[in-house]
Image: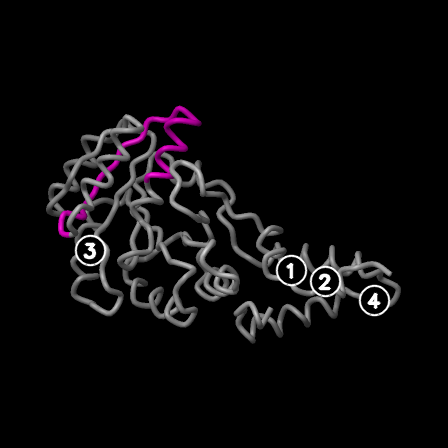
Amino acid sequence: MVKNGVDDVIVYKFLKKIEKRTSHGLTPNQIKNLITQLMSELVPVEKDYFSSINSKVLALVGPTGVGKTTTIAKIAANLSLKLKKSVALITVDNFRIGAVEQLRTYAEIVDIPLRVASTPAELEHIIYECRDYEYIFVDSMGRSQFDDDQIGDLMKFLEVSPLIKVALVLSMSSNHSEMMDTYDRYAKLLPEYLIFTKLDETRYFGPLVNLPIKKKTPLMLLSKGQNVPDDMELPDGKKIAGMILNEIPALWSDK
C-alpha cells in the first residue's frame, strides 16, 4: 500500500482493522478475500452518478491539461448514445485557444447542443433555457491551481445557480502531493465529487484511496485514454483494491 502511495496513517488504520478481523487458521486465499473486501469498503464511491446528477448541472473543474473536456465528452456521449438521455453542454472556457472548437466537435458528432457562456449572467440564463434537459454539463476553463484570482473568477460562474454541482478532475499522471495541494486550492469551489483521469499513465494508485478518504469526497468516475465514449468507467471498490494490492502474489498463492 505504501509503495502505491497510500497515506501512512490510512495504511496503519487499515492494518489495525485487518488485525482485528483475522485469526489463526485462515488460508492465504481467505486472507486475500478479507483484505480485498475491507479495502473495497474503505474508498468512498458515488454508487449511482446517473441519479446523483440527474436534473442537476455538473461542472467539471480542475487544472489545465487534466482532461476535463474529453471527460465531459465521454460522459455526455455515454448518456446520449447508450442510455438515450437528453443532454446539454455548456462551456465557459472561451479563453483557451481551440477549447470551444474541441467540445463543439464532440457535440456535433453526438448531436448534443452546445452553448457558450462568456459571463456568469449568461451562464445563469443558459441554465434556465436548458432546464428541460435531463443532464447538463459545464466545461470550465483550465486554471493554474496556484492562481487564486483565476479560481475566484471561476467561482463567480459556479455561484449563479443552486443546481450546479462541482466535480474536481485530477490527473493520475500528476505528483501525488500536488494532487492534495490542488484539492486544497480548489476547495473553495466546494467539490462534491472526484474524477481521476489518465489512469493509464501511472502504476501507483494511492491517490484513489487518499483523496476520497482524507477529503471526504467520493469518487465519481475514472478515465483513461482518449477514446470517446469509451475509456471511462464507474469506480469499483474491489477493482481499486486489486490495483493497490496486485504486487504481493506470494501472500495470495495458496500452498
Local SS, label 2: helix
Mark 3 and mark 1: Cα distance apart in space: 40 Å
Residue density around tag 3, few if under 14, some if 14–19, many if 20 or more, within 10 Å: many
Q: Distance between the Cα atoms at labels 4 and 3?
A: 53 Å
- Give the structural element (helix, strand or loop) at label 1: loop
Q: Quadrant of residue 168?
A: bottom left
* Tag 3 secondary structure: helix
Amino acid identity at mark 1: Asn
Q: CA distance from mark 4 to mark 1?
A: 23 Å
Q: Is residue 15 magenta?
A: no
131 relative to 36, above or below: above
* Residues at marks 1 and 2, CA–CA distance in whole angstroms: 7 Å
> Nearer the viewer's eye, disc 4 or disc 1?
1
Residue drawn at point x = 18 percent, y = 30 percent: 129
Bin the neighbour count of mark 1 within 10 Å (Cα to Cα): few under 14, some 14-19, many 20 and up: few
Q: Which residue is mark 3?
A: 154
- 2 and 4 marks in contact (CB < 8 Å): no
Which residue in the protein does label 1 denote? 246
Do the CB atoms of the residues marked 3 and 1 lie less than 8 Å apart? no
Residue receiving disc 2: 249
Circles 1 and 2: CB distance less than 8 Å? yes
Q: Is residue 36 left or right of residue 46?
A: right
Q: What label sits on residue 23 in the rendered view?
A: 4
Cβ atoms at labels 2 and 3 below 8 Å apart: no
Please say if 64 is above or below 88: below
Q: Look at the image and give the residue range highlighted in magenta.
A: 73-95
Q: Earlier in the sequence, mark 2 or mark 4?
A: 4
For residue 21, side relative to residue 177 (left or right)? right
